[in-house]
Amino acid sequence: MDKKNMHEQLSKSPYEVADLIYHYCQLQLEASKRLADYGTGELYTPVEVHTVTRIEENPGITVTEIAEQTARTKGAVSQIVAKLEAKNLIRREKDPQNARKACLYVTETGAYLSRCHKAFDERNMGAALERSINQFGLESVENFIRIIESWADRSQRKQNQQKN
């Protein structure tokens, strides 16, 4: 079979795969809005906890850098950051070399939330991965992870090109 038509061997058409991916993304979008307790007794959205963890893992990161890394606008990230500041999870500090640049850092409360978030994801995603490995096998799950990484990288590059 012609290499460019290999997809014809799949059980679903390209349209059906695109529709399935769209449906999954819609479900994930709705899930991203739900509040959850990540182990602190407080409720946060996934966007909030992932932003806190990104700041915890990259002390001094800026709103612009977060926007570039997460394919969000600077305005959207600024709103998230303002909410996190109001909840005493992060703080801004002026960069000593550039007074116009604000660097972001987690507070003790934010560091605790980040640790709890990581433990939460380890438990929940660990269980989901175990189920998938049992159902599809380790190699299939590893291939799926590589595909998702590749698609995410490609989407990130495309998004960055469209901004420039």
Image (cartoon, grey):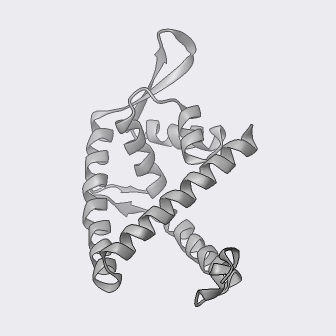
> Furthest residue to the front?
1
Q: Write the residue at 55% across / 74% down.
A: 27
* Most foreground residue, 3 or 155: 3
> Furthest residue to the bottom?
11
- Give the quadrant of the C terminus: top right
Q: Does any portion of residue 103 appear in the rendered image?
A: yes
* Most foreground residue, 60 or 150: 150
Quarter holding residue 141: bottom left
| Residue 123: % across, % down | 25, 65
> Furthest residue to the top?
97
Q: Is residue 116 left or right of residue 151?
A: left
The image shows residue 96, relative to residue 152, as above or below, that is above
Q: Write the residue at 49% across / 68% down.
A: 31
The image shows residue 133, relative to residue 152, as above or below, that is below
Q: Write the residue at 62% across / 44% down.
A: 76
The image shows residue 69, relative to residue 10, as above or below, that is above
- Give the quadrant of the N terminus: bottom right
| Residue 105: % across, % down | 39, 30
Q: Is residue 32 left or right of residue 129?
A: right
* Most foreground residue, 118 or 138: 138
The image shows residue 86, relative to residue 59, as above or below, that is below
Q: Write the residue at 68% across / 48% down.
A: 159
Q: Is residue 109 left or right of residue 161?
A: left
Quarter holding residue 41: bottom left
Q: Does any portion of residue 40 appear in the rendered image?
A: no
* Most foreground residue, 35 or 10: 10
| Residue 107: % across, % down | 32, 33
Q: How many marks?
A: 0
Q: Is residue 129 left or right of residue 158?
A: left
